[in-house]
Image: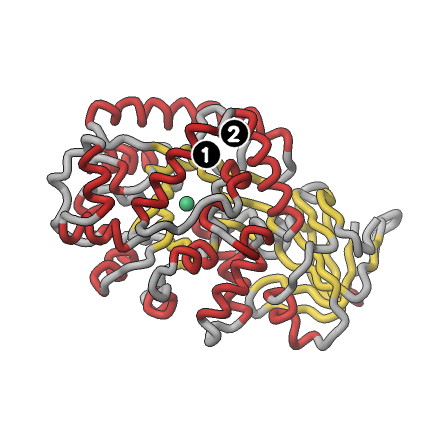
Amino acid sequence: MILQSRAIWASKGNLIADGAVRIRGERIAEVGARVDMAPEAGEPVADLGNSIIFPAFVNAHCHLDYSGLAGGLSPGTSFADWLAQIVSIKKSLTHDDHEVAWLAGADMLMSTGCGTVANIESVPGMYARMASQTPLLVCPFIELIAYHSEDEIAAIDLAQNELMANEPLALKVGVSPHAPYTMTPEGLKALAIFADENLLPLSIHLAESDDEWDMFVDGAGPLYDTMSSLGRVMGDCGKGTPVQHLAKAAGFSKKTLVVHANRLINADIEMLQRVGADVVHCPRSHAWFGHANFDCDRLAKAGVNICIGTDSLASTGGETALIGLNMFAEMQELSRNHPELPCEDLLQMATENGATALGLGDEIGVLKEGLIANMAVIPYNDSVLSVPEAIVHHRRPVSMLMIQGKRVFSGIDSIVD
Ligand SMILES: [Zn+2]
């Protein structure tokens, strides 16, 4: 099958006017100019007219099962306060609530052009039940919490069981020690070893809040008090930044997605670069909590791969909550705070960089021969030169989303049958 359109943004620096994509089965067979791609005998051709085709987004961090919590929490007086709210709300949620929210979140992502998501799975066994219910390529990262030494073995067992259950179903499986404040240093090390032994990416919330900073740098603050009251042994606190803490614990694996990285010193950035970590920035969650400006520039200059995640709707409010999980909205928030960033760079963060972070750079994230046919379409009838800007600032559902060569979503203004 050939799809033709006014423009194709295939990847950064690769914009094709009057383009065409040939799809065979699940994969892309060819990308190029329309005039160079003659249909073979009997091959269907769909002319999408005034539109842009671009790679489906890769959302590098999400909690689909919190999608029912949109606007239900407040940033609170501290990060520890927000954590207490979500822990309390989660106690009232049933398995059904989690599953309904998980699927609703997947639909939100697909309607706004996302084809793959690195999802933190907080309910053991749930991914295996849900995987067949959505065409979205969900990469499950089982969430692990072990801040008492006696819980470390159970965390490794859970990671092992989830790996066995999920690996046959998913494009990529990972592990997610929740955060250094909800893990023991020994647990962090054991999970990094587990990830490396099984060639898995590891995702961890790190250097997210001032409270986390105060706990590890000063051995004080609301999060220190909360975790101490829960019986966490706090001897590892007051000794360095969160990034230094993870490094000292040997908690970086060979493929670590550092989620947030909101507060970093120069030595932290050097460390992230040295261990080859990828940073996942979640612009709307960042704004909602009111964190200080994300240090995009210093990270990029150090050569750290930066990608974009939506985080969950538990860290949204007002209009943002209504918009739902939406990678366009994340790029728009990032662009608002960093107007110097070219739209092509924002798009690369939302596509190719996420694929790289997941170790899926040879499968998804750009439109290229041999890769999985994951692509989105939006209407467009302006100059081809403004295509990246048009994609970043798009505000409606996409016209069409294709995952693994199949149309999985059509917007109301879709021109694709
Ligand atoms: Zn998160």
Amino acid type at circle 1 is Glu
Q: Front-most of 348 and 13?
A: 348
Q: Is residue 215 visible?
A: yes
Quadrant in which residue 230 is drawn = top left
Residue neighbourhood size for the residue with mark 1, other residues' Cα within 10 Å, grouped as few (<14), some (14–19), many (≥20):
many
Figure coloring: secondary structure
What residue is drawn where x is 74% and y is 65%?
A: 19
What residue is pinned by disc 2? Answer: 127
Q: Residue furthest right?
A: 42
Disc number placed over residue 68 in the picture, else none: none
What residue is drawn where x is 66% and y is 77%?
A: 385
What residue is drawn where x is 57% and y is 57%?
A: 319
Q: Is residue 137 left or right of residue 28?
A: left
Residue 73 versus residue 188 in the image, above or below: below
Q: Is residue 66 left or right of residue 33?
A: left
What residue is drawn where x is 82% and y is 55%?
A: 415
Residue 155 versus residue 172 in the image, above or below: above
Q: Is residue 66 left or right of residue 104?
A: left
Tag 2 secondary structure: helix
Rendered location of residue 192, percent (x, y): 29, 38
Residue neighbourhood size for the residue with mark 2, other residues' Cα within 10 Å, grouped as few (<14), some (14–19), many (≥20):
many
CA gap between label 2 and label 1 equals 7 Å
Marks 2,1: beta carbons within 8 A: yes
Ligand 1 is found in which quarter of the picture? top left
What residue is pinned by disc 1? Answer: 121
Amino acid type at circle 2 is Tyr
